[in-house]
Image (spheres, rainbow, N blue to C red):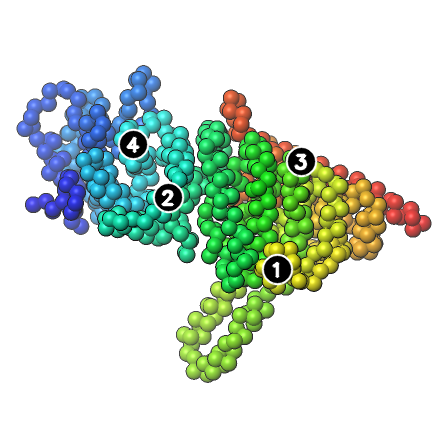
Amino acid sequence: MSPPSRKGVGLIPKQTYGKRRSFQGQDGLASISTTEQPFDGRQPISLSPLKRRNSGLTAIPAVKRRVSGGGSGTLKSVSAKSSSQQVSNTYDKLDDDKTAIRAPHELKEAGQSHRFKDDIEYMLEGIRSTDRLRVRRTSSLDLARSMLNKDFVGLIGMHHYTPIIFEALYEDRDPDPQLHQDVVAIDGVIPFLSKGLEMEMDPMAIMLTGRLEISMCNDLKDIARQSGIISKGQKILTKSILLYAAATILSERVTLKNVRTLSTVEGDANFMSTILSILIEDLIWIKQLSLTADLMLSDILDVDRIGNCLRILERLTSVSKRLIETISKNSRLLSLLVQLITLCRAYAFQYPRQTDSINLMMQALRLLVNITNDFEPCCESLAKVGLIQVLVQNFVQFYGRCRSYTPGHQDEEQNTSTVAHSNDTDMNSTDGDRHDDENGRQSRENGIENDANGWYDIVLLSAGLLINMLENNPARGEQVTDTAIGLECTSIGDCFLGECACEKSSESLERLVEIYNTEAVIGEMTENQVLAAYLALLLGCIIEGNPRHEMRLYRSVSGQTLLPMLELLQEFADIHQAVHMEQPKLDIHDTVELSTQPTQLESQQGPRSSSVSIGVHSPLPDIEQELTGISFETSGAVETRRSFLRIIGVLQEVQSRQVGLLQ
């Protein structure tokens, strides 16, 4: 007797399987080989259990194929629309296999495959049901809950169910036969996500009254929380889930250089305007943080939504100049981004173990690097809202933290209040306790090391963004040298409001030269040489065309000579020249750009090589000529080398003039 059907779903019963059952001798398959009904040569019914009740097709196989060369929209499948001879051979093979001996692991794999198909078909039947809305909702929740299991998700990909699931959820129609990857058609996903983001009222933010609706909403929130889509403590809303999906899809499409997908997104004006509107609405709450004491960054700002919006914009601006022009005209957004960077810096120093502020700052900096790369209108807009002063403060303060942030010092600060208790318990601690304490200490040291790496990345991103701003207009160097920088922030509110009471220094140029002197003499670490090289590039941009600044640089640099700095810049220029010469021979993409996190995050390509990029660029694939809105073309090492050579010429003239004055 078959087990009863699931409560509330009046559909086909769900099959179960014993551990020792062989699927070679199923009654369903055995009945095919018997001749209760003579075979008349007509098309046989598909062996696949996947049926669509709302479709004109009686059966659709789980595994899809492309459209046949001579057909007109029909789908090929393994079991459907085959020849009569193939079906006869299948029946004969089933008779022969009934007595075949199979290994236990083969039986187990076959059982898992059959069980998976029964489970997912059972849920898809409920999703496709049009008779009862409750059945669709319950089946959708069951499917979402099942996809929390990584093994289940792997089977979905293995059996090519991804497009089928989306079509069942979105609309009961056949999946796109042109799909050559196990992903849903992007032309259907982006309008679907865009429509959801345009909702005036978020369904999960409405006060529900029905018991069933409340229960289902809580179930969905629990699924989203378990999946890791929403950070702990953040509100679970429909738009937050949709933004995460959009950010994930677009990041993958940019990495794979999918021009068709990205052109679809770029051409959807509603989608991009919606993303910008959501980001601005969330960033407006920044002011509240400076007026309320004892609140964490995530208590007022929706960190997940802001992060996903920044991630979407950062990835798209790396390939779309049209989007860069759109953002550059939005002065309100640019001003809010500068405020976000300032606020995140203050929170990063006061709460160093909270990573929300570091992550948001790096995402904002990467976005600004993309939109300021060889685009003067955006640089001018950002300079008017005080970005240069913020970046100089970022560079000096985060560099100081990287130098002074050691595990021993941090442990001492965090454990001062527990020293007495620790001393009392050490005498009675067991070996296991000591082992746990050692593991805890090692974990803290690893976390501190990760924090220091994140701060170092912010130093590089700030330097790269400053170089972009000054290269487009050398006159902005005055804003760098005239900036009074605080050496250490002690209060979030005062720092954010521009009333910082920290110790100030008006010698920002001398401070930058001091950092260069420290990093240039450290030869064993590549990171130090990279920082020294780009800092030398920044110093050259600052003093270009200003004799007074030239004198300050020459007097502050180690040994009062620019020759070591020139040698370092020439070395990096030669590296980029070698990279450019070897570029056609490379097969592996290994690019490090300062528009991304150089040591931790994925590398990316931009529409133009940033003036602060360093790395190896792989050959670009062929791009559809008619899609001109998206471009993966990059000048790579050529533009970077040109920047180095230009500053080398500037510094050589300074060196010659200063030597002449001394003589």
Residue type, mark 1 in image: Asp
Between residues 593 and 463, which one lies in front from this camera angle?
463
Q: Quadrant of residue 516?
A: bottom right
Query: Can residue 289 be seen from the camera position used here?
Result: yes
Q: Marks 3 and 4, how far apart in space?
A: 46 Å
Mark 1 element type = helix
Residue type, mark 3 in image: Glu
Is mark 3 in CB contact (under 8 Å) with mark 1?
no
Mark 3 element type = helix
Residue drawn at x 81%, y 44% as measured from the top left: 546
Sequence-wise, which precedes: disc 4 or disc 1? 4
Q: State the mark number for residue 171.
A: 4
Tell me where residue 195 appears, x and y as whole percent.
Answer: 39, 35
Mark 3 vs mark 1: in front? 1
Residue drawn at x 83%, y 54% as measured from the top left: 555
Mark 4 vs mark 1: in front? 1
Q: Marks 2 and 3, how far apart in space?
A: 38 Å
Residue 14 lies, with reference to residue 79, above or below; the image says below
Residue drawn at x 45%, y 75% as measured from the top left: 434
Residue type, mark 4 in image: Glu
Residue drawn at x 41%, y 56% as measured from the top left: 232
Mark 3 Cα shell of 10 Å, populated few (<14), some (14-19), many (≥20): some
Q: Marks 3 and 1, how far apart in space?
A: 32 Å
Sequence-wise, which precedes: disc 3 or disc 1? 3
Q: State the mark number for residue 376.
A: 3
Q: Marks 2 and 4, how far apart in space?
A: 22 Å
Residue that mark 2 sits on: 202
Sequence-wise, which precedes: disc 1 or disc 2? 2
Residue type, mark 2 in image: Asp
Query: Can residue 398 be seen from the camera position used here?
Result: no
